[in-house]
Amino acid sequence: MKCENGEQKKYLNDKLRDITKEIAAKIKENLSRRGDSSQEKNITTYIESFILDDDELSDLTGEEVKFMVDRIELAINSDVSILEKYISDSEISEIMVNGWNEIFIEKNGEIIKVEDEFFDEEELGEVIRRIGSNVNREINERVPILDARLHDGSRVNAIYKNITDGRYILTIRKFVMKDVTMSDLMENGTLTQECVDFLETIINRGYNIFVSGGTSSGKTTMLNAILKGIPRDERVVIIEDSRELARGDLENVVQLECKEKSGYDDDEVSTDKLIKASLRMRPDRIVIGEIRDGKALVNMLNGLNTGHTGLCTGHSNSVEGMIRRMESLYMQESSFPIESIDEQIAQGVDIIVHLERLGNGDRRVVEVSELFIGERGRIDINPIFIVEKDILRRTDNAIIKSKGFDENEND
């Protein structure tokens, strides 16, 4: 029986599903603990005896039997089944499952469709339910969206099949806490030495920096690198949806994590609540993983405009787009005129560092700009670094908000 043939592969998958259920019951009965050294032998013995009793399976090769053993063991022992090897692969950053037989991965910046499949939609649904159960969250027709994390910190989003075309959708963004430095980013081409020198100087001078970009553009990686430039004696409060930022050599650090409502009597701990709490912790610098809503933005700007220094990221396609998005978020929570909102933003955010993900998967800083209030009372942009002929170059513009910044400091 050859696994390459589509019809035979489907037939084998159907058989595997039935065998898996039988073997799972057998193992639970006979093995006292998971991971027992005799487990693989027991699975192999049981499969072999099953095959001997089934004329349609008796012509399986040794290689095919091993495939079955490995596949069944994954289904029984791993909460994520066939996704285990992709989660364990450090070169894979994202896993995208569009139903039981359509799996994509992002590896080294390239999107690849893999050959592995779940047994059926039911097995994929069971994997999703197990992931939710491990963090005390449910997913069903009444609660069709699941946001969770795996034990290694990887972020999970799952969609129940009743709001799709009948398929479960599962997306896993791998958690990789890399100790990235500005030098690392310069070496891989994300930015230039001149830009590194500039950013390290403004970090040390206490400028409020907003890192913007699209999905997977490298915002969190950049923020991790920026953290390395914070003076070690500062008290830093880090606020995140899920833990992604490394504290590095910082000594006085508080790391806070948002908590979603997971039950009827459970309280949500949101970004805006944590920002309010952080202001009472005597922070020298507040670092926010990402601003997604108006309440969080308003509270962040209130903190930055009352003597605190901060760092943050946000989704946008350009510096101009990030400004418009902040205005829109602020207006959701306030009836202030746009000029007043712009003043709050420009006073609270000094510099925006914008990144893009290129077609080949590389991440690049494409603009570094200063925000200030122009003659019309609205936000204006002072470009400091821009891309010209595919090269990030320093403009001739001087920094408007000096904060002790010396243009000749790095000469």
Image (cartoon, helix red, strand yellow):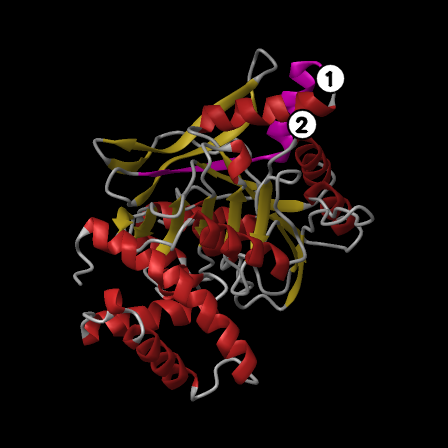
On the image, the x and y values in percent for residue 282 come to 76, 55
Query: Is residue 12 highlighted in magenta?
Result: no
Can residue 72 be spotted in the picture?
yes
- Does dot 2 land on a helix, a strand or a loop? helix
Q: Which three-letter amino acid code belongs to the residue tagged 2? A: Gln
Name the side, left or right, on which 92 lies relative to 210: left
Q: Are marks 2 and 1 in contact (CB under 8 Å)?
A: yes
Residues shaded magenta: 336-357
Viewer-closest of 335 and 17: 17
According to the picture, the residue beneath numbered tag 2 turns out to be 344
Q: CA distance from mark 2 to mark 1?
A: 10 Å
Q: Looking at the image, is mark 2 or mark 1 nearer the viewer? A: 1
Viewer-closest of 327 and 208: 327
Farthest residue, direction top: 376
Query: Is residue 355 highlighted in magenta?
Result: yes
User: Which of the labelled discs sits on residue 336, or is there none?
Assistant: 1
Identified at 62% across, 38% down, the residue is 141
